[in-house]
Image (tube, rainbow, N blue to C red):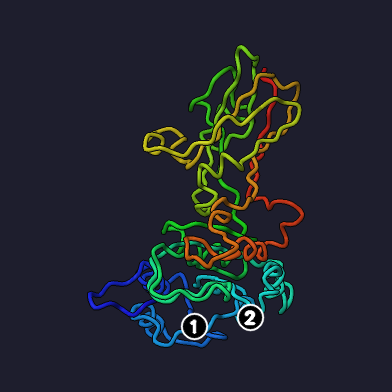
Amino acid sequence: MPKTGASGENTKFQQHVAQFLSEVNRTATVRQKAFYRIKEKPYEDSYQGISSTVRSGIQQPAKSTDIPSVLDTLMSNYYQPGTVSVLISDFIYSPKNAGAIPYIKTDITDALSRSGSHPELGVSVYGYTSDFRGTYYPALKAAGKKTNCCDTEIPYYIWVLGPADAVRRFDAALLEQQPAKQAHFGVTYPRPHYSLLNKFQNKGSWYYGDAGASKQTADAYRVVAVSEASAQQPVEFVIGIDLSRLPGQYRDVAYLKQNLKLQGVDTDATLLDVMAATDQTKASSGPESKFTHFAKVRLTRQPKAARPLVLRLQDQRPAWVAQWTTKNDATPASKTFALSSLLDGLAPSQEGGARQIFELPLTLQPGE
């Protein structure tokens, strides 16, 4: 947040954060709100005061703020039902003792749990980059500060912390409309609406096996009845999925192609492709217009009896986290020191395996 230049120029950070603060201040979604500036601890301020600082620049920069201490304070003093804490920072973790660097993950985990167990805790991380003017302080103090910086954009982040349901609602209301890198920890989402589509890119001999399917007009079909299937005459069917209530991370087609899995019993069914809705599907008069994404499945063996088939999306660390992580930030770059370790500290509950975002059960059965 440099002081405004003679020609009125400012940074993308200033423009973005000023707009975000205005939206938080104006929205009726957030009924009560308080604004804080953080030095060694949070100090209450007003919307006008924070907004003015963001716009006009910091007059007296603070020394490096200890991230675990800030998180500990938030969890100890501000964690309440229906309440989120929103932390905006470059998250450059620069402990006073360089020997603490290998323990960044542990320090973050401890800070979030020191005030007691919060099994419902959710954290969303949104990453951005901005042009940077002023003095750059790397995490590794031995590298020395850099003045008149920088020739590259520097990352900054918005962290949303609180009970998982409150985090989900805040994200949907105020952060999902703007493009950003994303990572979510402990936040749960309602199961997406989904249905088989028998007149959309389907092949082979199959039909809806749901009881009363021929009389239904609803678009919630879950049973695939296969009349005939072979290598020469494979069956292909498409499942429409509405992911509109999930964050952008889980709507990204590249992410879905890598992490959406199909699991069946006594079947060779495989997931062929994952596609996003197009202008054509959105404008269609068919049921496909109600879905944001489509999963195409192929099988070449007719099931011998009714068998379960499940589409699962498990939470995996998005690729951008590794790409934005550096072990040495002496040279300013579009990377953050030890970012992966910071985020590892948010996910201790994932040590037993990846968290499940959703599962969509279906049934395969032989046709008549």
In the image: residue 251, left or right of residue 345: left
Q: In x, y percent, where is residue 73?
A: 62, 82
| Disc 2/disc 1 C-alpha distance (Å) | 24 Å
In the image: residue 160, left or right of residue 69: left
Residue 23 vertical position relative to residue 35 in the rendered view, above or below = above
Residue 133 vertical position relative to residue 366 in the rendered view, above or below = below
Residue 64 in which image quadrant:
bottom right
Number of residues whose C-alpha sits closer than 10 Å to that of mark 1, classed few (under 14), some (14–19) or many (20 or more): some
Please state which of residues 5 and 39 is positioned toward the viewer in this rendering: 5
- Mark 2 and mark 1 lie on one chain; the one further toward the N terminus is 1
Three-letter code for the amino acid on which mark 2 is drawn: Lys
Q: Disc 1 on helix, strand or loop?
A: strand
The mark lying in front, picked from 2 and 1, is 2
Three-letter code for the amino acid on which mark 1 is drawn: Tyr
Q: Which mark is residue 96?
A: 2
In the picture, the quarter occupied by the C terminus is top right
The residue carrying mark 1 is 36
Number of residues whose C-alpha sits closer than 10 Å to that of mark 2, classed few (under 14), some (14–19) or many (20 or more): few
Q: Disc 2 on helix, strand or loop?
A: loop
Residue 109 vertical position relative to residue 262 in the rendered view, above or below = below
